[in-house]
Amino acid sequence: MEPEAAVRLDEIARAQHGLITTEQAVKALGPSRKARWVSEGRLLSIQPRVFRVAGSPETWHQALHAAALAAGGTVSHRSAAELWGLIRPSGYVDVSVRYEHNPRMRPPAIVHRIRDLHPRLAVDREGMRVTDPVRTVIDLGLVMPTWGVRDALGRGLTSRLFTLQEATDLREALGRPGRTGTGILKRLIDARVLSVDGEESLLEARFVDLARRHELPPPALQHEVWHAGRFVARVDAAYPELRLAIEVDGFESHASPDAFQHDRARQNHLVALGWTVLRFTWRDVVHDPDVVARTIHDMIARLAAA
């Protein structure tokens, strides 16, 4: 029976990122064999009533699933946002439960007790129940600064995970005095932060906002560079009369070796044609806007003088 039991347990664990609950282990092995496997280190306790099968890799997805299984909850907040691609990878393990529940959890799990946790606002993703994208953005207002929620909202819109109308409708449905997340989302929607024409990414929107605040000359967005009747490149922003190109790299951009190689060849072609190329990252634009603005100001002055 031991080999058969091990096969049954392994099948369950494979579908759960290497995890098995106490109930599943008892059903597959029986109470005494389950206790022996725990004492032998073949089942490793990582959350209350949740075990990792020895030999299975320890991953962030496993930690998420373990927390959700142990709490009987839904992956939410920063963890859900990372799964949906709305924020930079952060490694948080956030789960939400109904407010009347207060499960005892082990680190790194963070449990959020939510009064309006509706099952219909969660979907299956990567083997787990996860809050849907709009609900996730609203919940981010409880754990992230306004600029982080704004960026997540913009990323969800530009990647078409939801529409602005869907975000507005859910905000109104969940809105109540003291509900921080919905208040932040209302202000962002009302401000129409992402309504600038011609911008193709959230990061470019942040750059345009930076240019305005620091009184830089308005750049040409998504400027196409041609030479001898042939297309050379399309740059995020440019001052064509100075042959100054500005590229703003998002955290998900240019990740593959092929994309990296193409980017460098493209930049070299621009430089060979007499263009100056300034590159800034997500971190530069968001966290060091003064440095970015000063660098562009100085380069404009130098090129204009030349």
Image: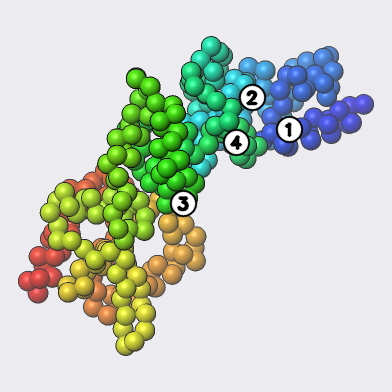
The C terminus - image quarter: bottom left
Residues at marks 2 and 1, CA–CA distance in whole angstroms: 12 Å
Count of numbered circles on the image: 4
In terms of sequence position, does the residue under pointer 2 or pointer 1 come before the other? 1
Q: Secondary structure at mark 2?
A: helix
Q: Which residue is mark 3?
A: 159
Per the image, the residue denoted by label 4 is: 123
Q: Is residue 268 visible?
A: no
Distance between the alpha carbons at the discs numbered 4 and 1 = 21 Å
Q: Which mark is residue 13?
A: 1
Q: Quadrant of residue 101?
A: top right
**Disc 2 versus disc 3: nearer the observer:** 3
Earlier residue among tags 3 and 1 = 1
Q: Quadrant of residue 28?
A: top right
* Residue 252 position (above or below residue 271): above
Q: Secondary structure at mark 3?
A: loop
The residue tagged 2 is 69
Q: Percent from the top left, x then y, of residue 90? A: 44, 37
Q: Kindly indicate whether the residue at mark 1 contacts the one at mark 3 (C-beta within 8 angstroms).
A: no
- Secondary structure at badge 4 equals strand
User: Viewed as shown, does residue 141 lie left or right of 76?
Assistant: left
Within 10 Å of disc 1 (Cα), the crowding (few <14, some 14-19, many 20+) is many
Residue at 37 percent across and 29 percent down: it is 182
Mark 4 or 1, which is nearer the eye? 4
